[in-house]
């Protein structure tokens, strides 16, 4: 009987245990199903805000009772996400701090980094920029430590967005490029790539670099061809709005209208992204107003304002009212223009964004001329305050990074000592490098000074050479004239004698006169040949005098051919009237050729060099070309040689053109104005 009782008791306990286990499993499944439903309802855009908050709170109540494990933290992140989507910032912060506590307890580095980005988003929404930056920076350091490149790139983007909002455009640009460098090595990162290009487009638009802004916005738009990005995000509408806004800033209102209209035509835009719909509607209305198209105006302005009022979009409401003020000012309705600008000013003053107040002050000053000076004065004061605030915030960001790194460094005395040694070594290296650069610069300056002095000395020598050559030539001309005069006189004497002798023939009979006449005619022929030879000699000397500059150049070319292996080809246009070219121009051209040949010999490694003089109407053209290595004219800085060439061409009121590319040789063209007709007339006179 006792045995039967024990068996019966055992069976009851087993049955009771199975029943409890079944109930427990059912409870787990039931709570899991309820959680999924609550999460879905909390994200339903068709439900009122208070309903969504209630369902999210129910989900939170279930999750908070669960064990602190990875799944629990995933669910807590879902709760936080839904509060973020509802803009319930207080609840969002509360849940984020709870996740941080649980992640630290579990030593879950990935979750710690992620929740720091959540807290960064919270402080950014509350415009506490330094706290936001600190949290992003903490997340960045953890992601670097665990080599989570995907989330590191996303953190960089959040940080860049914060820097953009604080007006630190340069730092924001650098941070975006850090993100891009990572994203380009990651597959399936289309969404983050889109955000990077879109952010760069916004940055360059703010910096008024509109071509770059359009380039990156179009890159962002091309990323959206990847169908893996959900259409509910309405990223295409976002890009179309941003491109339209760039054209709006460029005052290309017709093109802006095209993009804003395309944005509004995107499917389900109003339901998926009501804020963007209102923005596009306001931008379209403003573009139409600016392009003097008044269809559906001011109705579109009011429709956009109504949406923004219902969503309590502070910045959008201010901008909308400024646009309406501009519209009514144009329509000569001063009362409404002032009314809307005052409303915008009151709202902007209540906000913490000084930029909104600046825009409102600028508008009200333009429509209320009686108080324009007061508003302008306030505008100037606020603008200075804003610039100082942006500068301080940029400095604060740098200080946060520095101080955070300092705290980490203090965790180890050995690291601190090593760091000190590194600093000392770096300082010594920098000092050594500075001393080396200083001495090198001094030597370079001395070399440049020596080259300049050498060029001045060479020019003086050349001038003396030209002067001496001219003196020699003048002396030769005088001697030639003297000789020509003497010859001329001697020839005339002979001719006179022959003429007298011919006259005497009239007194002789034909038989005796014929041989003498023949003799005298032969003598006349000899005299004629002498005169022609003397005349040709004198003309040749005159030509040599005129071509004295050509002779000097040929001497330079001869030295070039004797000294260097490269083949030299020279040509002179026969139509050039060198006697009409001033000595100043000749000197400068000589020095330009000398400098050009030196550059060919020193840098070009050319096999063939060609120097050519050509004559055009009222211009003398010098070209020096080679088939050498060439160079990039946009990237290469002009040395002292090229500067000298440009300076000498300018002395002649001429121009210098340099065409070159790597591996394609170099062409130097100098074009000097020569008014030969005027000079010729002056010469003739």
Image (cartoon, rainbow, N blue to C red):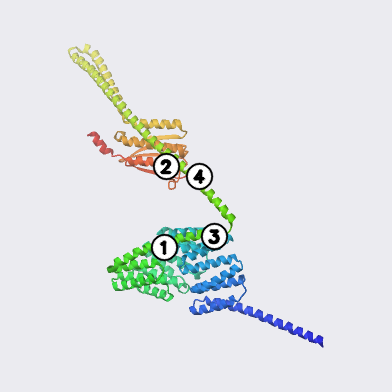
Inspect this view and state whether residue 541 appears. Answer: no
| Sequence-first tag of 4 and 2 | 4
Q: Is residue 61 above or below residue 449?
A: below
Residue 177 in percent (x, y) is at 49, 58
For the residues bearing labels 3 and 4, Cβ distance under 8 angstroms: no
Q: Residues within 10 Å of mark 4 (few under 14, many from 20)?
A: few
Residue holding disc 1 = 389
Residue holding disc 2 = 639
Residue 592 in percent (x, y) is at 38, 38
Q: Is residue 363 above or below residue 449?
A: below
3 or 4: mark nearer the eye? 3
Q: Is residue 495 above or below residue 403?
A: above
- Report the Cα–Cα distance between label 1 and label 3: 26 Å
How many numbered tags mark residues here? 4
Tell me the tag on residue 407: 3
Return the residue nearer the eye: 187 or 354: 354
4 or 2: mark nearer the eye? 4
Q: Residues within 10 Å of mark 3 (few under 14, many from 20)?
A: few
For the residues bearing labels 3 and 2, Cβ distance under 8 angstroms: no
């Amino acid at each position: 009987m006792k045995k039967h009782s024990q068996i019966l008791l055992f069976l009851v306990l087993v049955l009771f245990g199975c029943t409890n286990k079944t109930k427990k499993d059912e409870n787990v499944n039931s709570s899991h199903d309820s959680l999924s439903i609550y999460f879905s309802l909390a994200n339903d855009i068709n439900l009122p805000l208070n309903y969504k908050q209630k369902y999210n709170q129910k989900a939170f109540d279930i999750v908070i009772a669960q064990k602190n494990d990875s799944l629990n933290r995933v669910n807590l992140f879902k709760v936080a996400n839904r509060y973020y989507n509802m803009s319930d910032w207080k609840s969002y912060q509360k849940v984020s701090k709870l996740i941080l506590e649980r992640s630290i307890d579990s030593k879950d580095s990935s979750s710690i980094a992620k929740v720091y980005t959540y807290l960064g988003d919270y402080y950014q929404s509350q415009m506490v920029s330094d706290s936001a930056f600190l949290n992003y920076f903490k997340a960045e350091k953890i992601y670097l430590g665990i080599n989570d490149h995907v989330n590191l790139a996303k953190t960089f983007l959040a940080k860049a967005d914060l820097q953009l909002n604080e007006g630190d455009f340069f730092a924001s640009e650098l941070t975006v490029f850090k993100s891009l460098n990572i994203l380009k090595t990651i597959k399936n990162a289309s969404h983050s790539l889109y955000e990077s290009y879109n952010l760069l487009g916004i940055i360059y638009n703010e910096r008024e670099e509109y071509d770059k802004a359009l380039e990156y916005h179009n890159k962002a738009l091309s990323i959206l061809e990847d169908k893996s990005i959900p259409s509910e995000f309405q990223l295409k509408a976002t890009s179309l709005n941003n491109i339209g806004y760039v054209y709006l800033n460029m005052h290309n209102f017709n093109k802006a209208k095209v993009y804003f209209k395309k944005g509004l035509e995107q499917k389900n835009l109003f339901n998926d992204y009501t804020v963007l719909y209102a923005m596009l509607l306001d931008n379209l209305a403003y573009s139409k107003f600016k392009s003097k198209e008044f269809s559906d105006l001011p109705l579109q302005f009011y429709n956009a304002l109504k949406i923004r009022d219902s969503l309590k979009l502070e910045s959008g409401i201010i901008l909308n009212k400024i646009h309406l003020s501009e519209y009514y000012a144009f329509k000569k309705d001063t009362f409404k223009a002032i009314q809307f600008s005052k409303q915008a000013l009151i709202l902007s003053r209540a906000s913490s964004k000084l930029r909104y107040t600046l825009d409102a002050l600028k508008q009200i000053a333009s429509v209320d001329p009686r108080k324009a000076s007061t508003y302008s004065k306030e505008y100037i004061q606020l603008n200075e305050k804003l610039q100082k605030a942006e500068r301080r915030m940029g400095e604060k960001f740098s200080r946060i990074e520095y101080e955070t790194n300092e705290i980490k460094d203090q965790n180890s005395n050995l690291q601190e000592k090593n760091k000190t040694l590194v600093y000392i070594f770096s300082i010594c290296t920098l000092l050594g490098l500075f001393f080396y650069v200083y001495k090198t610069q001094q030597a370079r300056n001395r070399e440049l000074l020596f080259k300049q002095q050498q060029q001045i000395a060479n020019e003086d020598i050349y001038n003396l050479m030209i002067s001496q050559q001219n003196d020699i030539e003048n002396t030769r001309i005088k001697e030639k004239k003297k000789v020509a005069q003497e010859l001329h006189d001697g020839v005339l004497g002979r001719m006179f004698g022959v003429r007298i002798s011919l006259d005497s023939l009239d007194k002789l009979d034909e038989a005796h006169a014929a041989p003498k006449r023949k003799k005298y005619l032969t003598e006349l022929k000899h005299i004629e040949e002498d005169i022609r030879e003397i005349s040709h000699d004198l003309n040749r000397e005159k030509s040599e005098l005129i071509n004295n500059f050509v002779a000097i150049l040929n001497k330079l070319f001869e030295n070039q051919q004797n000294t260097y292996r490269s083949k030299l080809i020279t040509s002179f246009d026969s139509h050039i009237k060198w006697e009409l070219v001033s000595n100043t121009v000749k000197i400068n051209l000589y020095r330009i050729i000398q400098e050009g040949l030196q550059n060919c010999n020193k840098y070009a490694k050319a096999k063939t060099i060609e120097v050519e003089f050509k004559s055009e109407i009222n211009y003398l053209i010098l070209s020096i070309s080679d088939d050498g290595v060439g160079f990039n004219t946009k990237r290469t800085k002009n040395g002292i040689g090229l500067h000298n060439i440009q300076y000498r061409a300018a002395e002649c009121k001429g121009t210098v053109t340099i065409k070159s590319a790597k591996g394609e040789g170099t062409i130097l063209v100098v074009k000097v104005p020569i008014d030969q007709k005027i000079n010729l007339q002056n010469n003739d006179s």
